[in-house]
Structures are given as C-alpha cells and as structure tokens.
Amino acid sequence: MHIGRIIGTAVMGLLFMLFIALDLVLFGLIPLNSVIVTLLPVIGLIGGGVLGAVVGRRTATAASAGPSSQ
Amino acid sequence: MSILRWVIAGAGGAALLLGSASLAGAEISGTNGCQASGTWREGGFTVDAATAVGVITIPRSDTVDWQGSVTAPPGTYSGSVWVELPPPFGQVEVDSWSGDSQTTSNSGSHEYDLPSLVPAGVEIVVGGEHTDDNGSCSGSVTVEIDGGPFSSPLTAVSLVGTALTGAGMAALVRPMFGKVA
C-alpha cells in the first residue's frame, strides 16, 4: 500500500474538483447554493484516493515484474 | 462499449447539473400578511417580493429605496436577511432587526457598493424572515450582479487553480497509463 501516494492524489483530486466547482459557479452554470459545490470536492477526494491506490498498485506490479523480465 | 460508457457518464453529469438548478425567482409567504419591495434608483426597476419572477439582475452599486409592511401592529418583532451558501455551510446573515412597535410599515434607503471580488453573473439566493406577535413570514429572492465572469479577479484565480491542480492530477495518475513490463 502506498499511503503517501493515495493521500497525495486524494488531496490533489479534492483541490482540482474544488476549483472545477468554483469555475462552474463563477461562470454562472450552477447557483451558489447548489449541492454540486459540496459534492464535487468529495467526489474528487474519493476518486483521487482510488486513482492513487490504482496507480500505486500498478507501479508496484511494474517494479516487481521489471527485474524478472531482464 | 467505451463510447456508450462516455455517453452515459456525460448524460449523468448533465442530469446532475440540470437537476441542481434551483427554481429561481422570488417568493414570500407567512401568517402576518407581510409585504416587501425595493426600488433601485440607478437601475430604474422595482422588485416586489410577492410578484417578482426569474433571476433579478442588480447593479454592482446603487441605492435601494425599500419598504416593508405587515397588516396589524406587530408588537415584539424580530427578523433577519441572509445569503444561502452551499451545504453544509448554510446561511450567512447580512442584516437583522428586532424591537417593539405598533407601526405597521417601515421604509428607508440603503446605498451599497459591492467589491469587485464579489462575482457577477452568479445566482445568489437571498432569504429573509420576520416574526412578530401576529405570526411570521419568510421569503427569498434570487439575484445576480450585472456583468460577466471576468469582472471578478476570483475567476482568473480559479482558472489558474484549475489548471495547476489539473496538471498535478495528470502527473500523479500518469503511471496508470504506462505499459506494465
């Protein structure tokens, strides 16, 4: 488990989706009191964590497969 | 199959956006027969909380001649006006009042000048409530400041933030798209 990568990607996902939500509000696509403003950062946090875990697993698989293939 | 997945994801996103759109406009209801209205001097329009429909576009700065009334002497009264924020932040109170009176109406003028940081073109729901000895009433109105998204520096900051965090996100998940040896 790459906890550091999972947390890093989750935080980055949270910030990314927070800015997306802010963009949607500022461009008038959703109202200020929309629940989407709350949901998007949460989706970013969870999605980022999942992506971080997938990337970590894939990186570990690549690292373990690397020496045996040579 | 992947095209179908993207179509479903896109339709879901669109439904989420459309479904979140609030019914814009104004409404007022209660048990003490309250009424409220305001006239923007430079804007040259009047908003009556009971009849206004749609999103009301207001100037960034102006003077509003307001009036409010109830049908019977209120006695002990209190009330407040607030701006609704996304959940779970609730509401931010912008003004409140309280006292004891037998007068059934009140009026005044309020000059405002919103800073450029407040974004234009954003639908903002402003709510209000008044309670007195005869009952209570509450209402809301949806307003937006006249102008485009780039009249606030916040938009540029947000777009830069989106680009930076998007690039960071792409860098972090990049190994996912590489070939496993």
Image (cartoon, coloured by chain):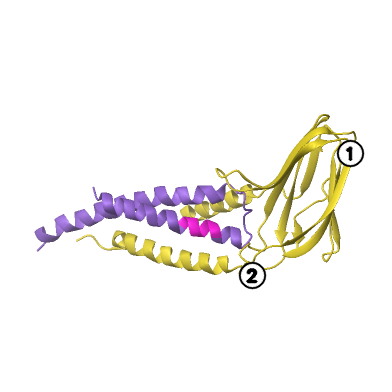
Q: Which numbered marker is on residue B80? A: none
Dot 2, how many residues are within 10 Å of its Cα: few (below 14), some (14-19), or many (20+)? some
Quarter location, residue B144:
bottom right
**Residue at (59, 52) in percent of width and height:** B17
Residue at 73% x, 52% y: name it.
B142
**Chain colored yellow:** B
Find residue B82 and report its horizontal and vertical position in percent.
68, 46
Tag nearer the camera, 2 or 1: 1
Which residue type does callout 2 highlight? Ser
Residue B135, position as x, y percentages in the image: 80, 30
Secondary element at image label 2: helix
Q: State the purple chain.
A: A
User: Dot 2 corresponds to which residue?
Assistant: B151
Quadrant location, the N terminus of chain B: bottom left
Residues drawn in magenta: A17-22
Q: How far apart are the alpha carbons under marks 2 and 1? A: 42 Å
**Pointer 1 residue:** B103
* B167 sits to left or right of A67: right
**Residue at (56% x, 49% y) in the render:** A36
As for residue A52 lying within the magenta part, the answer is no
